[in-house]
Image: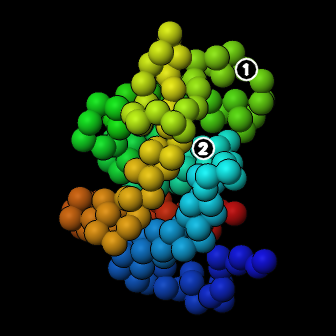
Amino acid sequence: MENRAHMEPIANRIARFQNGHPIEIIDTLLNSIDNHFNNEIRLTIQEDHYQTSLMFLGIHAVALTISEGFFNVGGPDGYKKFLENYVDGSTSDTKFSDIATEIHNWRNILAHQWLGIGGYDIGYDYTQTEGWVERDGIKFINPRIYCEHYLAAFKAGGRMWDYDKRFPEEELKQIKVRLLKKFLSK
């Protein structure tokens, strides 16, 4: 299997990002995430092949990329802002931003230490009908519902694509500057 997200010659891409409207870099980022990264995230919730830890790591990576670029907010606050804007559903059990701190801490344990006391605050239950529920002080998340809400933001007409209505022109320019600076830094 081969998966190469960056096929365009680097000089062309830099010129396009620098000289183009902010939509150039924003659409490139979102399309790249959706066409490459999300294809792998979709696989993490296939029955009998769950890759729950990888799903949480992947969604979190996208969340911070978007929140830092779009809102200039990172860390737990950026993650919560991402959930509020793109993932949260209309019912209380699908307001994942209400447990953003717990999910963020769990992701940090997965990514940076593997064992941690924060792992005692969170559990998975693919059979529950709620997106998340608290039982005996533990927040149980249905990873499939969480992931489906995340992926829905990227579908045609999804919330991820309304950035041109969400942000005035001046903010779009600031997003372009932040994304370009990050692109050129590494």
Q: Image height check: is 141 above or below 134?
A: below
Q: Which amino acid type is shown beneath numbered disc 2?
A: Phe
Most foreground residue, 156 or 182:
156
- Which element type, helix, strand or loop, lies under badge 1? loop
Most foreground residue, 6 or 73:
6
Most foreground residue, 156 or 77:
156
Residue 173 appears in the figure: no
Q: Which image quadrant is residue 103 in?
A: top right
Q: Which residue is drawn at 76% across and 79% down?
A: 2
User: In the rendered image, which residue does mark 1 sit on?
Assistant: 116
23 vs 90, left or right, is right
Q: Image height check: is 128 above or below 42?
A: above
Residue 134 percent coordinates (x, y)? 44, 19
Identity of the residue furthest to the top in this view: 136
Residue 110 percent coordinates (x, y)? 71, 35
Residue 117 percent coordinates (x, y)? 69, 15
Contact? badges 2 and 1 (CB < 8 Å): no
* Cα distance in 3D space between marks 2 and 1: 16 Å
- Which element type, helix, strand or loop, lies under badge 2? helix
> Which numbered dot is residue 79?
none
Most foreground residue, 41 or 26:
41
Please state the total of marks drawn on the protein image: 2
> Which numbered dot is residue 56?
2
